[in-house]
Image (cartoon, rainbow, N blue to C red):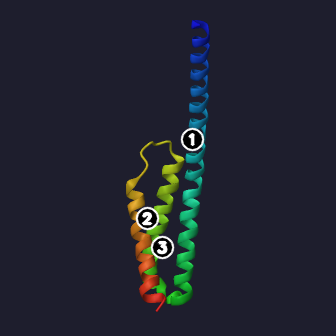
């Protein structure tokens, strides 16, 4: 009786360990993919929004759009640099800056470009 209880305990522990290992590998894989995709998605989104603004406002908009472009470039480079380094400290600040930049661009598109 105690032998079957021991075997059941070993099977449970083995199954638990396998589930933990597969879960850990899956999470590491998802984080690795997201570290590559996030800068790509950010760059694509910024380029599409900037293109929409330039098509509507023409190149005369460079007078004020250069500040947005510069902020986007700095943010993109910072995101790539933090993803390439092995620093564990991922940034709340870069996402706050991203939200502010996207808000400015979306506000310009919504209130000035669309009407």
Q: What residue is rendered at 53% in x and 71% in y?
A: 46
> Disc 3 or 1, which lies upstream in sequence?
1
For numbered disc 1, what is the local secondary structure? helix
x and y, in percent, of residue 67 in the image: 42, 75
60 lies above or below 83: below
Identify the image quadrant of residue 2: top right
Residue furthest top in the image: 2
Whether label 2 touches label 3, CB < 8 Å: no
For numbered disc 2, what is the local secondary structure? helix
23 lies above or below 7: below
Q: Which residue is mark 1?
A: 28
Q: What residue is rendered at 56% in x and 42% in y?
A: 27
Judged left or right of residue 89, residue 57 is: right
* Dot label at residue 69: 3
114 lies above or below 4: below
63 lies above or below 78: below
* Dot label at residue 20: none
Judged left or right of residue 90, residue 1 is: right
Identify the image quadrant of residue 111: bottom left
How many residues crowd around disc 1 within 10 Å: few (fewer than 14), some, or many (20 or more)?
A: few
* Dot label at residue 98: 2
Q: What residue is rendered at 55% in x and 51% in y?
A: 35
Q: State which mark lies toward you, 3 or 1.
A: 1
Whether label 3 touches label 1, CB < 8 Å: no
x and y, in percent, of residue 57 in the image: 51, 89
For numbered disc 3, what is the local secondary structure? helix
How many residues crowd around disc 2 within 10 Å: few (fewer than 14), some, or many (20 or more)?
A: some
């Amino acid at each position: 009786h105690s032998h079957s209880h021991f075997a059941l305990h070993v099977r449970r522990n083995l199954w638990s360990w396998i589930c933990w290992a597969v879960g850990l590998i899956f999470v590491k894989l998802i984080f690795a993919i997201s570290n590559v995709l996030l800068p790509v998605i950010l760059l694509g989104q910024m380029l599409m929004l900037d293109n929409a603004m330039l098509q509507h406002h023409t190149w005369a908009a460079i007078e004020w759009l250069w500040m947005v472009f510069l902020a986007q470039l700095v943010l993109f480079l910072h995101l790539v640099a933090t993803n390439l380094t092995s620093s564990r400290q991922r940034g709340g600040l870069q996402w706050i800056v991203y939200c502010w930049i996207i808000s400015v661009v979306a506000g310009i598109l919504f209130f000035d470009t669309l009407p």
